[in-house]
Amino acid sequence: MLTLPNRGGGPISSRAAVLVLLFYSSVIPMALFWPRLLRYWRLRNIAKWPETEAVVERANWSYGGKENSVLVAEISYSYRVEGERYSGYWRRMFRGPNSASDFVNDARGRKLQLRYKRGKPEKSFVVKLV
């Protein structure tokens, strides 16, 4: 009989040990892959949204996060759907000021390819810089 210590001080049966092992061997991979799975589902649904172009209105970067340890580039943009004007922002994180600055400078004066939610055009998702 396989025995493992437990809080009560007595041994755990081999059946209970197998159940514990199965539980942890399934929970840990789920915890690791769950964010990727959610992102996949989200992107799969967004791929069905209509596409349009947006104009970059502003592009800046600043320090953020705990103790200003992260550089955050923010691009504000506007777009039109059926004659109505909408706006949004796109944030990306960078490790160094040069890469954040390069990204922001490259974005100024450019357009964005984005998708918007049918029926709720105020919801948008940036695909890429054009």
Image (tube, rainbow, N blue to C red):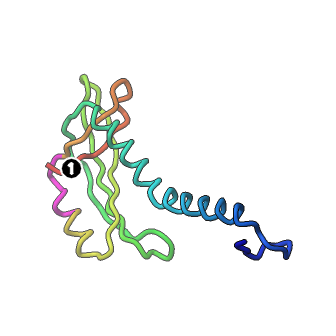
Q: Quadrant of residue 98?
A: bottom left
- 93 vs 108, left or right, is right
Q: Position of residue 86 (x, y in %)?
A: 32, 35
Image quarter of residue 87: top left
Q: Height in image: 58 above or below 7?
A: above
Image x and y of residue 34, in percent: 47, 53
- Mark 1: give few (<14), some (14-19) or many (20+) Cα within 10 Å: few
Q: Secondary structure at mark 1?
A: strand
On-image quarter of the N terminus = bottom right
Where residue 122 appears, as percent x and y from the top left, is: 37, 33
Residue placed most toward the observer, 130 or 63: 130
Q: Is residue 85 above or below residue 106?
A: above
Read off the magenta span.
104-111
Give the answer, above or below, for where 36 lies relative to 24: above
- Residue located at (82% from left, 73% from top): 7
Q: Nearer the viewer, residue 122 or 22?
A: 22
Residue 118 location in percent, x, y? 33, 26
Left or right placement of residue 71 versus residue 24 in this view: left
Which residue corresponds to the image point at 76% horizontal and 76% vertical from the top-left?
A: 5
* Identity, as a three-letter code, of the amino acid under mark 1: Lys
Residue at 25% across, 22% down: 82
Q: Is residue 93 magenta?
A: no
Q: Residue at x 20, y 35 (%)?
A: 52
- According to the image, label 1 marks what residue? 128
Front-lying residue, 113 or 7: 7
Instruction: Find the residue positioned furthest to the front.
Output: 1
Q: Is residue 109 magenta?
A: yes
